[in-house]
Amino acid sequence: MKVDSGDTAWLLVSTALVLFMTPGLALFYGGMVRRKNVLATLMHAFGALPLVTLQWVFVGYSLAFGPSLGGIVGGLGFAGLSGLAGEARGTVPHLAFCAFQMMFAAITPALIAGAFAERMRFSAYAVFVLLWSTLVYDPVAHWVWSEEGWLFKLGALDFAGGTVVHLAAGASALVCAIVLGKRVGYPHERHQPHNLTMTLTGAGILWFGWFGFNAGSALGSGPLAALSLVTTHVGAAAGAVGWLAVEWAQRGKPTALGVASGLVGGLVGITPAAGFVAPWAAALIGFVAGGVCYVAVVSKERLGYDDTLDAFGVHGVGGAVGALLTGVFAQKSLNEAGRDGMLYGNGVQVLLQLLGIVVVGAYAAGVTWLLLKAIDKVVGLRVPVSDEREGLDATEHGETGYAL
């Protein structure tokens, strides 16, 4: 197929937008921690980007999108990105598609870091990022997005990463929070966000970058990209409203943190559905995702785990809600590559979506548990209590976020 300049231009711009989401995530997370841990938290995002980039070049892309080995994982035919230069994938250069997917791979383990912020060794995190990307992200991406992947062939739908990115990261985040244990003093001591202005700025960058995340997944600049952009924006807006509605009713006040968290929950929820559903359905999905994510987040103390920045409550729960509702509202008439959902006569699609949620969540959680146990024995997962009290900026990185 001939390379199309318009499709290529949109994919290159989308690649840059998704890259911009990683520093956006750094600000979003960084504002929610205490001042003594802000640089350490930013380093989780900025550290994952170069590490995963190199992993993706040498083995990751090949494992995710290389010639399939039984629908489970790709072979090493594309290792080092060999053979991609000058080749096309659909209507775009193969290298452009590879670079676009690289940005997805890079931000996903950084999402997990929200669960263990303020207490994990950076050395352990670096090892975890490389192993998790290789053993969890790459195979799951192959299952769901490779044309030979077993979930893809069954008909499970995930337009831009509801299961591959958010559910996998969220399930792993929950395991991380449980294995590492609670922060010193949690929940009795107050762990107040030190800079909500930073968090809202990060949320705005994420909203902006998410247009590349979802609309870029159309891999072209035509009607499907337009649909995905609109549903993404509507889903984010509805997520913010859904979160605030529940929060306002329960607490009596709408909060700035609620707006930021709700819009991200809405974006997570619409991600698997963005190219398969109508805008009105996107509003329903976003609203439900925002409200359900709020309930998940406020339930963590009662359930007894310390997910510092709510990586599971927003990404895990929001990803599962969005993936399931994709099976309800999807319309093949909007995207020939999709399938009809339950609302349009195909109730089986909900079961396929549920299968994807269960399998991906269980696989990600199980492998994450094994990785954490192994890493703990080799380098140790958690900083000493004295370092945690002093702050990871100073003890892990020898720096301070603010010279005041």
Image: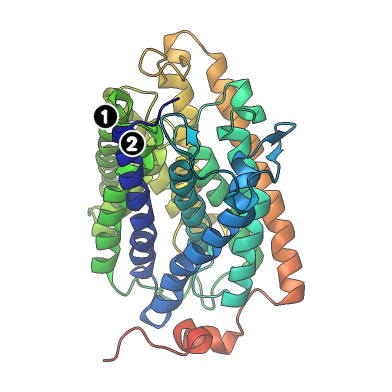
Query: What secondary structure is found at the residue carrying circle 2?
Result: helix
Residue 284 visible from this viewpoint: yes
Point out the image quarter for the C terminus.
bottom left
Query: Which labelled disc corresponds to residue 226?
Result: 1
Name the residue nearer the viewer: 61 or 387. Answer: 61
Q: How much space separates mark 2 and mark 1, taking CA atoms? A: 7 Å
In contact (CB < 8 Å): disc 2 and disc 1: yes
Q: Position of residue 170 (x, y in %)?
A: 53, 50
Q: In this picture, is 13 found above or below 332?
A: below
Q: Classify mark 2: residues with Cα within 10 Å, few (<14), some (14-19) or many (20+).
A: many
How many marks the image carries: the answer is 2
Residue type indicated by callout 1: Ala
| Colouring rule applied to residues | rainbow
Residue 279 vs residue 72: left or right? left
Residue 334 vs residue 179: left or right?
A: left
Q: Residue at x 45, y 73 (%)?
A: 43
Q: Which mark is residue 215?
A: 2
* In this picture, residue 70 sits left or right of residue 185: right
At a point 25% along the width and 35% down the height, the residue shown is 234
Mark 1: few/some/many CA within 10 Å (<14, 14-19, 20+): some
- Above or below 132: residue 158: above
Find the residue positioned furthest to the front.
Answer: 86
Residue 262: in sight, yes or no?
Answer: no
Query: Mark number for residue 144?
Result: none
Sequence-wise, the earlier of marks 2 and 1 is: 2
Q: Quadrant of residue 352?
A: top right
Disc 1, SS = helix
Q: Give the answer, above or below, for where 286 lies relative to 310.
A: above
